[in-house]
Image: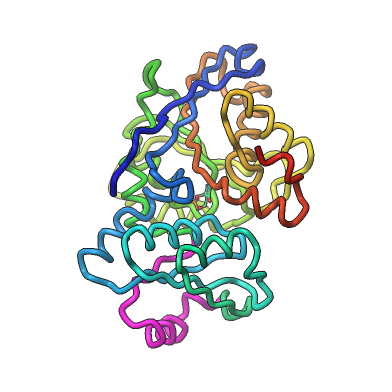
Amino acid sequence: MKLSSYLQWQNLQHPVLTDNQTELWLRYAPSNNPDISGNKLLKLKYQLKQALQQKYPGLLTFGGAFSNHLVATAAAASENNLKSVGIVRGEDADLNNPTLALCQSYGMQLLRVSRSYYQGRHLPQVLQQLSTEFPGYLHIPEGGTCEAAVRGVSELDMRNTPNGPASLLICAVGSGGTIAGLIRGSEATAVLGIAVVKDQSLPDKIKQFLPADRNWPQWQLRQALHQPRYGRFDQQLWQFCQSFAEQGVQLEPVYTGKALYSVFELIKAGEIPKGSRLSFFHTGGLQGLKGLAYRGLIQTADLK
Ligand SMILES: Cc1ncc(COP(=O)(O)O)c(C=O)c1O
């Protein structure tokens, strides 16, 4: 994979940061394609490597109708001349929505399944059925999270900002693979995850990637403080995301914007101490904005 030159770090400006003598560095991950940006390429890196080395015909993965992961998998497969199949949650998923249309433009074959079938995607009989239908395809879990993904994310240096070592590494948390990678790669720096889904089992999902025989840095998971339910946001949160546009920073309100909003709340509440140097992983997901506009949840005019 060829990586073009890209912005790695950006020092975010905001009065809340100035007032609290806090530095916040956005960390961008390398990508030559905006559809595989943020945590996506890192999560897919070793899975792609395996598929290519072992000459798998394609990748098969799972996601919702607006999934960033489905798009990234479709794009990565296409770039590497692999076929791809996306198992989409909901028989009624709209194949013309911007996310699924983009997947198909990358050549991904989409299979819409009922929610109950989707829930059983881990069951041996379901996996067997999919293997029969798509023989030899590499199965990638929903969200891409697995040991190989955690390893890929752990290789991103989140600690050494251009201004010196960060005191806290931060990311949005969905399926838990990204934060597990941050913890694995962090050595001693503390890690904070902002959960944008309500999932009681998240701590256990993260711990399964952190073998108990090693000392891991201190890490903490906090539920998003504002609009904690997955996918929910209000005008205040969306305006917060847009307020960074003049600095050239694009955020979406489902993952990065929601997590950053909570970080600002924690700074204001003094829960993140003054004088901190924060390293916040911009995990991408910007393709999702078009889906929000498609559903009328934001204005198309806002998508500049
Ligand atoms: C844009 C974005 N940020 C953060 C995450 C959360 O990552 P993880 O599922 O590894 O916790 C996701 C989900 O993959 C995502 O699409």
The quarter of the displayed image where residue 100 is located: bottom right
In percent of width and height, residue 101 lies at 58, 64
Residue at screen point 62% across, 70% down: 95
In percent of width and height, residue 81 lies at 32, 64
Q: How is the image coloured?
A: rainbow
Residue 185 in the figure: left or right of residue 91: left
Tag count: 0
Asked if 235 appears above or below 78 in the picture, the reply is: above
Instruction: Report the quarter where the C terminus lies.
Output: top right
> Is residue 159 rendered magenta in the image?
no
Of 45 and 229, nearer the camera is 45
Asked if 23 appears above or below 78 in the picture, the reply is: above
> Is residue 126 rendered magenta in the image?
yes
Residue at screen point 66% across, 55% down: 291
In percent of width and height, residue 295 lies at 74, 57
Q: Which residues are magenta?
A: 119-142
Residue at screen point 50% across, 21% down: 11
In the picture as drawn, the residue positioned furthest to the left comes out as 53
Residue 64 in the figure: left or right of residue 177: right
In percent of width and height, residue 213 lies at 28, 49
Asked if 265 appears above or below 18 in the picture, the reply is: below
Residue at screen point 70% across, 52% down: 292
Asked if 11 appears above or below 297 in the picture, the reply is: above
